[in-house]
Image (cartoon, rainbow, N blue to C red):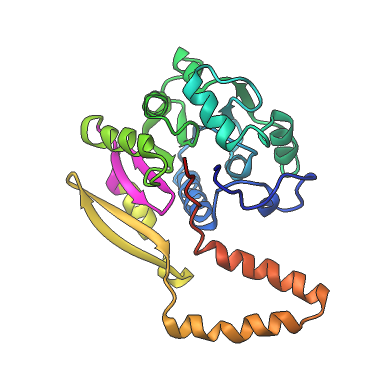
Amino acid sequence: MPREETTVAGPAPRKRDDIPGWFFGLDRAAFSHLLSAQTAAGVTGDVLELGSYLGRSAVLLGDHLQPGERLTVCDLFDSEAADADNAAEMSMSYRKTLTRSAFESNYLAFHSELPEIVQAPTSVLADGRIPAGSCRFVHVDASHLYEHVSGDILVARAALAEDGLISLDDYRSEHTPGVSAAVWEAVFTGGLRPVLLTPMKFYGTWGDAEATRRTLLARDWRAEDYAVDEDAIAGHQVLRLNYRVKTPAQLQRSAPRRIALDLLPPVATRATRRVLRTLRERRAVRPTPTP
């Protein structure tokens, strides 16, 4: 069965969390921190997203565009896939909800102009339409098939400037082994340097990984209730960022809150549930599709 969305498709969103998708708070924080740090350091360049679904991450990327910068998104949307395996993947997970019109409506709810949209397989970007070295940040979240992800990584490498950053989704999910294979192949044979790992995304660069690491450590993540650890992979130091795990005592203290929620009037209950939904996101794990 397909993996579940955090929300369902509907009217134009009033807030970013209303957009269906799997772009959770921890990675939103990481994206914003890295993009803002680039801007503060005077780094300029375009932004590229391969696989946009209904725009949850694209909207955030658009938030960080500076004058003269361009966001390009590439997705099949409601077009037919170019091969049978990709078509099967889309039918399982996206076909019923993914349309270009829904993406555009969601994006325009928060920005006055659409990004550059390429409605096609991400492989078309290998034709050079994205100028070499023009991007400072590339987000890859398209197909989960090894051959496609490998190609997307090559597209990203060509598009990125010397110290540009790549973020790859689903690098460790058990239902996406093709992504894992392509990502770690790029690390061990393609020169990609890992800098940050979250439960959902891999962040790396073909440039100065140590500079990016210092940028990440400049923020006090622990004060924001995140857990930060460090590992060495292929001779490179890499940070691991996750939600801080609650202790049994903290979890036990939440039980009275659930009882109180049942006693609240409907209006207050809805407001409280919205807050709790945001908190639950910190522990969210995507359901694993079954064959």
Q: Nearer the viewer, residue 101 or 134?
A: 101
Does any portion of residue 70 appear in the rendered image?
no
Asked whether residue 215 is in view, the answer is yes
At a point 41% along the width and 69% down the height, the residue shown is 222
Say whether residue 95 is left or right of residue 264.
left
Percent x, y of residue 145: 42, 30
Residue at point 44%, 50% (across, down): 200
> In the image shown, does 280 or 134 lie closer to the viewer?
280
Residue 2's spot in the image, x, y percent?
55, 42
Give the position of the N terminus as an image quadrant.
top right
**In the image as oriented, which residue stretches furthest toward the front?**
291
Q: Is residue 202 magenta?
A: yes
Q: Is residue 26 above or below residue 147?
A: below
Residue 87, x across and y down, in percent: 54, 24
Answer with the quarter of the image where residue 75 lies.
top right
- In this rendering, is residue 41 above or below 147? below
Give the percent coordinates (x, y) of residue 147: 38, 24
Establish if 37 lies above or below 79.
below
Does residue 109 belong to the magenta stretch? no
- Tally of marks: 0
Q: Which residues are magenta?
A: 191-210
Please give the name of the residue rendered at 44% of the width and 46% of the height, measured from the top-left corner: 41
The residue sitting at 63% across, 26% down in the picture is: 116
* Residue 168 occupies quadrant: top left
Vertical placement of residue 273 versus 264, above or below:
above
